[in-house]
């Protein structure tokens, strides 16, 4: 469940970045703070599994970095929106290896994963995925723990949904990366 808060003044991404985490999980949507539920345990396990698979690949293929834990992605300016990607991949071409911003990166990641929570609707996830793509993210994925599927949204291609027995690959973005979808959903 997401709840919009109302304030008189709209926040910028930079002002939002300065807020303390003691207020709980939140995102900035068109200048307004959106409070969110704390994700459940299964959600966290799936996020870690996806991040681990990407991190393991990037250790062997040092072409970028992975971030997680709802790291902020600026998806809109004036008014600003900052979404918390469950897992994101940034190539070193977009975010140089020696650059680790304290705030939010100026460039969007190439790949974002959102893990569907029981309180999220597919309509909300489609809107969020579209927002990522409009902000310059190349590929937005939604992992659904209940059905063990990954739905992949591209900027200029048809949506693809992969079942648990399929293999997740993105050869143009992550050469030779191939992970069975089931590994995203089951702790190793």
Image (cartoon, rainbow, N blue to C red):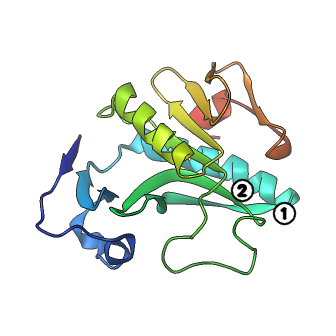
Q: Residues within 10 Å of mark 2 (few under 14, many from 20)?
A: some
Q: Is 188 positioned to the left or the right of 176 in the image?
A: left
What mark, if any, has residue 62 been given in the picture?
Answer: 1
Query: Based on the displayed image, in which of its 4 quarters is residue 153 positioned?
Result: top right
Vertical order, 57 against 142 (above or below): below
Q: Which dot, 2 or 1, sits closer to the camera?
A: 1
Residue at left offset 72%, top offset 56%: 55
What mark, if any, has residue 55 been given in the picture?
Answer: 2
**C-alpha separation, residue under disc 2 versus residue under disc 1:** 10 Å
Rendered location of residue 29, percent (x, y): 31, 54
Task: Check the picture and name the quadrant holding the C terminus.
Answer: top right
Residue at left offset 45%, top offset 24%: 146
Looking at the image, the residue that sits furthest to the front is 78
Rendered location of residue 36, percent (x, y): 27, 50
Dot 2 or dot 1, earlier in sequence? 2
Residue 159 seen in this snapshot: yes
* Viewer-proximal residue among 92 and 119: 92
Rendered location of residue 186, percent (x, y): 59, 34
């Amino acid at each position: 469940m997401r709840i919009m808060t109302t304030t008189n003044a709209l926040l910028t991404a930079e002002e939002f970045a300065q807020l303390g985490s003691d207020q709980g999980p939140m995102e900035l949507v068109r200048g307004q703070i959106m409070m969110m539920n704390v994700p459940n345990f299964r959600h966290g396990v799936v996020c870690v599994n996806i991040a681990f698979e990407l991190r393991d690949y990037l250790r062997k293929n040092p072409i970028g970095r992975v971030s997680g834990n709802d790291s902020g992605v600026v998806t809109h300016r004036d008014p600003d929106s900052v979404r918390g990607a469950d897992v994101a991949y940034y190539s070193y071409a977009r975010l140089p290896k020696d650059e680790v911003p304290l705030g939010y990166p100026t460039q969007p990641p190439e790949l974002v994963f959102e893990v569907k929570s029981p309180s999220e609707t597919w309509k909300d996830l489609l809107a969020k995925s579209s927002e990522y793509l409009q902000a310059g993210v190349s590929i937005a994925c939604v992992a659904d723990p209940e059905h063990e599927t990954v739905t992949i949204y591209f900027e200029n291609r048809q949506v693809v949904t992969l079942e648990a027995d399929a293999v997740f690959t993105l050869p143009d973005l992550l050469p030779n990366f191939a992970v069975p979808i089931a590994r995203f959903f089951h702790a190793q």
